Image: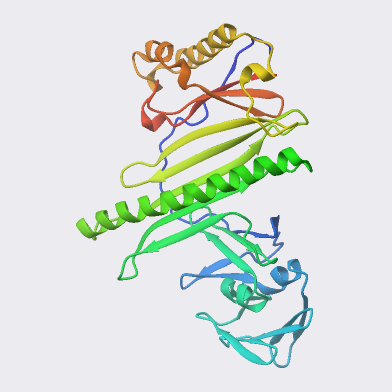
């Protein structure tokens, strides 16, 4: 590893609530569906999607009958029909679902509630209410992602828990082992965070219902720096439990030959002492660039907390990071710098 510091702050800003939600992204069997004209929309708290585009992504044939304003989708032996202005979803001639919002036309596209898609061809639909992501899987199993909304008895949204993983793509036993390990971690964390958020949000809402803002936990696992030798999986966690959103990073790096954990000294030729010097110089350079963003004794804190420094691989670089609250306030977010491998 070269000893040249390429310092750059990642997140020195306070999260501010957006006035409008971000664009809605849709995945079918982990492939993003691109909408050239009419994008998904939210109507009366229901997410509507372009029916033709979604069903074709699910390998269904779609036809439109102008006189009756009816759209028909066929997949195998199943035939699904919906009519503009009506709420019924017919499958093989029988009503199998009644939509809260009727099928309607927008920009010459037939729009239907996302739940109608699930019922039509027995797909699984997961909604990430934080990132506005719809994840549709058609093989009868979930993609491994998790999304749950928790409501009070009166229907008020209390909290959202969401976990996603962009897995390793290598066709190898090691990658399969690592991916399974991450999905197992996600399942355990989903259970823990759902209980934790429900308990905390219920207590907060009961105490101050008028000023309550919904809590959320969002965990995003992402494979980075994937190569034939090593790869990292980075977990970014965003949590809101009143007050300010907190953001933390954690990462594991793996040997792509056997799927085992890899230490930094397995990847680079530097000694542990050289790496400590590198980390201290790198973060010190960031402190010198913008001292007001850090604690006044940030360098002393750094020296005492070098064991808190994490790392992950990203393309041809090693990224070193420290979570907030160590050398800078919580509002600073994650602090990081990178060096070329």
**Place of residue 142 in the rendered image (x, y in percent of width and height, measured from the top left):** 62, 60
| In the image, farthest residue toward the left | 207
Q: Quadrant of residue 125?
A: bottom right
Is 179 left or right of 297, judged from the image as shown?
right
Res 169 → quadrant: top right
The residue under the point 66% across, 63% down is 137
Question: Residue 130 at x, y = what percent?
Answer: 48, 53
- Residue 150, position as x, y percentages in the image: 39, 61
Left or right: where 290 falls relative to 72: left
Q: State whether residue 340 appears in this view.
A: no
- The answer to whether 5 is drawn above or below residue 147 in the figure is above
Q: Can residue 203 be seen?
A: yes
Vertical relation: 330 (above or below) 113: above
On screen, residue 288 versus residue 41, left or right, reads left
- Residue 17 drawn above or below residue 247: below
Q: Is residue 250 above or below residue 109?
A: above
At a point 30% along the width and 71% down the height, the residue shown is 154
What residue is drawn where x is 64% and y is 16%? 265
Between residue 171 and residue 173, name the one nearer to us. Answer: 173
Look at 54% across and 14% down and name the residue there: 279
How far across and how far down the image is residue 300, in percent?
38, 10
């Amino acid at each position: 590893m070269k000893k040249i510091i390429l310092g750059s702050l990642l997140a020195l800003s306070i999260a501010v609530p957006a006035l409008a939600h971000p664009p809605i992204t849709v995945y079918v069997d982990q492939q993003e569906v691109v909408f050239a004209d009419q994008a998904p929309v939210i109507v009366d708290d229901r997410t509507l999607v372009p029916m033709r585009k979604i069903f074709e992504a699910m390998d269904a044939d779609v036809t439109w009958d102008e006189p009756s304003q009816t759209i028909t989708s066929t997949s195998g032996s199943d035939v699904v029909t919906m009519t503009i202005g009506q709420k019924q979803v017919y499958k093989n001639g029988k009503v199998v679902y009644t939509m809260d919002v009727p099928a309607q036309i927008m920009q010459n596209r037939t729009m239907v509630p996302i739940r109608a898609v699930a019922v039509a061809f027995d797909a699984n639909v997961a909604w990430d209410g934080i990132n506005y992501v719809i994840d549709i899987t058609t093989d009868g199993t979930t993609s491994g992602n998790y999304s749950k909304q928790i409501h009070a008895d009166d229907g008020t949204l209390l909290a959202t828990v969401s976990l996603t993983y962009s897995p390793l793509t290598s066709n190898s036993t090691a990658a399969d082992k690592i991916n399974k390990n991450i999905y197992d971690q996600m399942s355990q964390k989903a259970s823990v965070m759902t209980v934790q958020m429900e308990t905390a949000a219920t207590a907060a809402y009961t105490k101050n219902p008028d000023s309550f803002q919904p809590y959320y936990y969002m965990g995003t696992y992402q494979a980075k720096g994937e190569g034939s030798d090593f790869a990292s999986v980075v977990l970014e966690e965003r949590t809101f439990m009143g007050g300010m959103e907190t953001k933390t990073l954690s990462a594991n790096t793996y040997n792509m030959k056997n799927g085992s954990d890899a230490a930094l000294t397995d990847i680079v030729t530097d000694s542990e002492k050289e790496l400590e010097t590198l980390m201290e110089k790198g973060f010190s350079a960031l402190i010198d660039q913008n001292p007001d963003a850090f604690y006044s004794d940030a360098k002393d804190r750094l020296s005492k907390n070098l064991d808190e420094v994490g790392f992950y691989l990203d393309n041809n670089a090693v990224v070193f990071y420290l979570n907030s609250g160590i050398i800078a306030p919580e509002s600073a977010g994650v602090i990081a710098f990178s060096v070329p491998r």
